[in-house]
Amino acid sequence: MKNLITIGLPSKGRLKDKAVAFFDDKGLKVLQSDKERNYFATIENKPNIKIIYLHAKEIIQRLGDGTLDIGISGLDLLAESEKNLQDKINIKQKLDFGSANLVVAVPDDWIDVQTIADLEEVAFDIRSKRNTRLRVATKYPNLTNNFLISKGVTQYKLISSLGATETYPFVGSSEIITDITSTGKTLNDNNLRVLKDGLILESKACLLFSKKSINKIKVLKI
Amino acid sequence: MKSKKLSEQIIKIFKSNGFVLSEPDVLLDSEYIIERSGENFKRSMLTFENEYGKEMCLRPDLTVASCIKFLEKKSKSKIYYSGQAYRRTDKKGSDLVNDQLGIEILGSKNQPQDDFKIIKTILNSAKSIKSKNIHIKVGDIGLFKRLINFLDMPERWKLRLIRHFWRPKYFEELLKRLEKNSDIDSVTFDTDKKRFFEMKKMEQEKVIAGRSISEILRRFDKKIKDPRSFNEGKKIVKIIRSFLKINCQLSKLDNKLQDFAKKNNLKKNIFKEFKSIQNLKKLNQEVKFITNFGRDIEYYTGIVFEIFSGTKEIARGGRYDDLLKSLGAKKDTPAVGAAINLNNI
């Protein structure tokens, strides 16, 4: 179909519900497929719009390669993606849901470490005493790198994590972590504490447009 | 090829001065390099995964690659190298591939003598090709360290300034904070004191995320005792800034440093014994001493120099006493080296 508009929405949880509600509020009522687990949906009276449910990270990728025209995903995931991908995507609007912070967290019992300045000192300590580097486990290597370097922390090594990053310091996989948190509960429950100046990024859900599709999606008025 | 002929001529001089060829590996273990140079350096490296999923990189630098070869006991200590290094930079249009031609003394026992040997050899080889308007710029990271250690300020500030001397931008940020006496870390500890006393009763060797309880408590205790409020910042920054402005002919350096010490009420002998610099008088060459110099490479620890022909830098080098140890040498292995910049010859 000519002028078919493809929208990518998060496939799970609260983010999915809020994203659907966002379109409903705009008068674009999302119609689920009869089959409960089907990944496609449509919009009432808009045969030229197709909705696909995808992993939030995938939404950024597909906006970049042009398979999606519009998407809702997290600012954190966009900011973490490679520059050439970011260059292809516009942030149309920051939305009032999906708030979460990307933070630097250390074990509770590192009572001598309260700020990034402390971390910088400890990192040098570890380096000079043991000739190893402070290991930072993260799902966000790019944002973590930029943040730490800008704060003067140089003596570290990133450990890439796919999930349950909070466990890493306590099983010997890393010393500290950076992770995304909305209430801080998971960090607390796992004996981790956010550094006082350890905020890397305030993230929200965002309405994103593929730059290539700008003309095509004007008709939608969102 | 013109450059090939030139390198052959230079290598001849290296050899006649007793330097032996080292042929470091082209492929290096990425992890090993990052362990030493830090995560941020990864951006400059050209890496790939080998068939077993291990990350490898093309050698980013022949000094580091030669050091690795030396540590594998596969090279002599007084070496020269000639080959390509591979590195990405942010600069547009800069080459990924750099020809490097240089000499190193790895495990340098006699510091002033070896420093002189390196400079003299590299100067002679550069001069054999380009002899017009030769002049040398030199600095010494060691002098800065001595000044800082002598100044009266909290220990953590001293260490910070020394650690970040090679990152001028961040260093400037630090100076500004010091000037305003605003510590980057003005937090109170009351809330944690309770936990401190609890932890004191625990098994002290217990490890929490790689650090033992005793290590954590020791640093906590030290932090409390280190003075928080500190009012001399402005005065100290003024001294540091005026030190970093010293820029003079080598022949005038003694007087200049004495003046500087006197003016700032520092001990007379604070800068004595920098033989490697004094030795350069023997070169019979125009030498300029600049305190604010050689700050772009992390691993230099002592003398640093660049040789110019007119405005073009044709060689550079310096002392790097900690590099080999950080690459895994069992004992302290001081070193000094220099390389010719073929592109400018």
Image (cartoon, coloured by chain):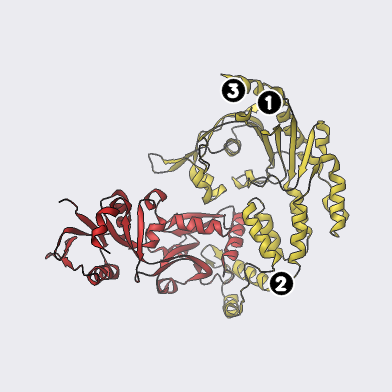
Chain colours: A red, B yellow
Give residue B227's mark. 2
Let me know if residue B105 appears in the view: no
- The residue that appears at 62% across and 69% down in the rendered structure is B185
The amino acid beneath tag 1 is: Phe
Please name the residue that numbered disc 3 is placed on.
Answer: B3
Closer to the eye: label 2 or 3: 3
The disc numbered 1 marks a residue on which chain? B
Query: Are discs 1 and 3 less than 8 Å apart at CB?
Result: no
Please determine whether, in this image, residue B291 is positioned above or below residue B73. below
The mark nearer the N terminus, 2 or 3, is 3
- Element carrying mark 1: helix
Measuring from the top left, give residue B168's x and y in whole percent.
Answer: 65, 52
Question: B79 or B343: which is nearer to us?
Answer: B343
CA separation in Å, label 1 and label 2 = 53 Å
The picture quadrant where one finds residue B101 is: top right
For the residue carrying disc 3, how many other residues have a C-alpha within 10 Å: few (<14), some (14-19), or many (20+)?
few
Please state if B212 lies on the left or on the right of B257 as rendered. Answer: left
- Element carrying mark 3: helix
The amino acid beneath tag 2 is: Pro
Query: Are discs 2 and 3 less than 8 Å apart at CB?
Result: no
Please state if A56 lies on the left or on the right of A143 as rendered. Answer: left
- The residue that appears at 25% across and 70% down in the rendered structure is A17
Please state if B144 lies on the left or on the right of A56 as rendered. Answer: right
For the residue carrying disc 1, how many other residues have a C-alpha within 10 Å: few (<14), some (14-19), or many (20+)?
many
Measuring from the top left, give residue A68's x and y in whole percent.
Answer: 26, 54
Please name the residue that numbered disc 1 is placed on.
Answer: B14
The mark nearer the N terminus, 1 or 3, is 3
For the residue carrying disc 2, how many other residues have a C-alpha within 10 Å: few (<14), some (14-19), or many (20+)?
few
Does label 3 lie on the same chain as label 1?
A: yes
Does label 3 lie on the same chain as label 2?
A: yes
